[in-house]
Image (cartoon, grey):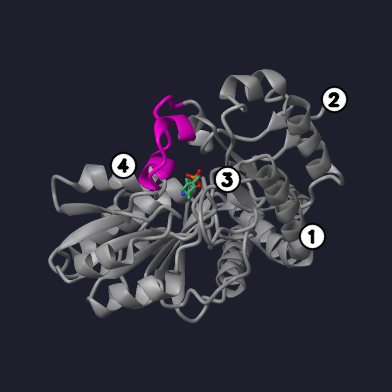
């Protein structure tokens, strides 16, 4: 086997051809500066980027409710939402919170802000869903900026976004949704009530190094970088034309392709789930999207056995991509109550669009060879 089998779509996705074409076209033709509107080339770029901004908002059905700031990816967007949101609303905020299972970015931002404002990690239950009772009690303490990872990157657990947003708003608080793992992994939902939302193009078949922060029209963000007045004065710097146009093309393409392949992907999810359950494995997480599957293997499948057996030609992960090089056990699975031994036997298989035919059968035969 020469080409590895790719089952690591939650870590990143390959560039789709629509995005590659848009990027090459932009590199060749749309090279002028977005702000150089005194000449025709600059005006064209300006127009194309504003079109892309509007298309992205429309594709996410947020054109009436939100404005969009391009960033370098979800890490920057999450920093901007929390640090910039804190700067804008610090007088009215009691604290900043995130789910204990949220991405490391949110947890590290909270850590950095903890010397300026109270920060809270919200516990989850054994299925990875927010602990409802704790959350309702927490909100009684006053308005907070609450981070919610819509679809968890390690387990695929989908939080009850609408219900949580309503509760936060009733308490006078603000919601930041990390939607990095949502697009192309589940059908679009109504997100028009969300205050701040982070997305990242490389998670939906677009280029790496580009993302966006979507901000509800009645909300503000103070900049955390200073420079010229690009991106509503919130995110200075010359916009990356080819990245932005690649991201827009990827988003349109992915939303359509996902809906066309959704049923097939669900079938494949059930084939994988049934296979592993028949071997005595347990799926970590409740209410999961069907593309990210976290599996606690029985004792006989040690990490060593998997690594020696086939890890070099099957691309999957132990925890998230960021966790693979980190020897500390996954904070996500720990927060769900798994012990170090169970975590070391847990793997993440993430499915994606346009997988070669028979990929799942080949994956399962790899496992069969060591079981
Ligand atoms: C849920 C989640 N949030 C944030 C990030 C960070 O995204 P980016 O790579 O665009 O900075 C990732 C990527 O690993 C993610 O999965």
Q: Is residue 334 magenta?
A: yes
Figure check: 371 above or below 195: above
Residue where numbered disc 2 is placed: 1
Could one spot residue 351 in this view of the protein? no
Crowdedness of circle 4 by 10 Å Cα count: few (<14), some, many (20+)?
few
Q: Is residue 361 magenta?
A: no
| Residues drawn in magenta | 326-342
At 64% across and 45% down in the image, what residue appears?
A: 350
The earlier-in-sequence mark between 3 and 1 is 1
Residue where numbered disc 4 is placed: 108
Q: Marks 2 and 3: which is nearer the front? A: 3
Residue where numbered disc 3 is placed: 282
The earlier-in-sequence mark between 3 and 4 is 4
In the figure, residue 338 lies in which quadrant? top left
Callout 4–callout 2 Cβ contact below 8 Å: no
Crowdedness of circle 3 by 10 Å Cα count: few (<14), some, many (20+)?
some
Q: CA distance from mark 1 to mark 2?
A: 25 Å
Residue where numbered disc 1 is placed: 264
The earlier-in-sequence mark between 1 and 2 is 2
Q: Marks 4 and 1: which is nearer the front? A: 1
The earlier-in-sequence mark between 4 and 1 is 4
| Local SS, label 1 | helix
> For this rendering, which residue is in front, 371 or 26?
371
The earlier-in-sequence mark between 4 and 2 is 2
Crowdedness of circle 1 by 10 Å Cα count: few (<14), some, many (20+)?
few
At 65% across and 61% down in the image, what residue appears?
A: 251
Q: CA distance from mark 4 to mark 2?
A: 40 Å
Q: Seen in the image, is 78 located left or right of residue 16?
A: left
Q: Marks 4 and 2: which is nearer the front? A: 2
């Amino acid at each position: 086997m020469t080409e590895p089998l790719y089952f690591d779509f939650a870590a990143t996705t390959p560039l789709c051809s629509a995005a590659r074409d848009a990027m090459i076209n932009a590199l060749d033709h749309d090279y002028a500066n977005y702000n150089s509107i005194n000449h025709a080339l600059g005006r064209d770029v300006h127009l194309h980027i504003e079109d892309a901004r509007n298309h992205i908002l429309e594709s996410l059905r947020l054109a009436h409710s939100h404005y969009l700031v391009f960033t370098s990816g979800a890490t920057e967007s999450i920093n901007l939402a929390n640090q910039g949101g804190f700067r804008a609303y610090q007088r009215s905020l009691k604290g900043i919170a995130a789910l204990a299972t949220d991405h490391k970015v949110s947890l590290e931002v909270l850590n950095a802000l903890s010397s300026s404002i109270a920060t809270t990690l919200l516990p989850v239950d054994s299925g990875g869903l927010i602990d409802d009772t704790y959350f309702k009690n927490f909100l009684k303490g006053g308005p907070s900026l609450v981070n919610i990872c819509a679809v968890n990157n390690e387990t695929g657990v989908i939080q009850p976004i609408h219900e949580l947003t309503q509760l936060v708003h009733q308490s006078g608080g603000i919601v930041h949704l990390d939607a990095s793992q949502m697009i192309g992994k589940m059908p679009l939902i109504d997100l028009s009530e969300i205050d701040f939302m982070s997305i990242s193009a490389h998670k939906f078949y677009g280029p790496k190094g580009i993302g966006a922060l979507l901000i509800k029209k009645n909300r503000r963000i103070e900049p955390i970088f200073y420079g010229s007045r690009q991106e509503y004065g919130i995110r200075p710097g010359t916009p990356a034309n080819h990245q932005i146009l690649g991201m827009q093309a990827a988003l349109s393409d992915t939303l359509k392709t996902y809906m066309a392949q959704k049923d097939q992907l669900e079938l494949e999810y059930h084939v994988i789930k049934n296979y592993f359950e028949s071997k005595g494995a347990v799926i970590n997480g409740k209410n999961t999207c069907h593309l990210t599957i976290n599996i606690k293997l029985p004792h006989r499948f040690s990490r060593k056995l998997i690594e020696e057996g086939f890890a070099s030609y099957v691309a999957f992960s132990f925890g998230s991509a960021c966790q693979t090089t980190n020897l500390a056990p996954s904070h996500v699975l720990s927060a769900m109550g798994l012990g170090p031994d169970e975590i070391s036997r847990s793997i993440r298989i993430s499915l994606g669009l346009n997988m070669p035919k028979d990929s799942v059968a080949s994956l399962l035969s790899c496992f069969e060879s060591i079981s």
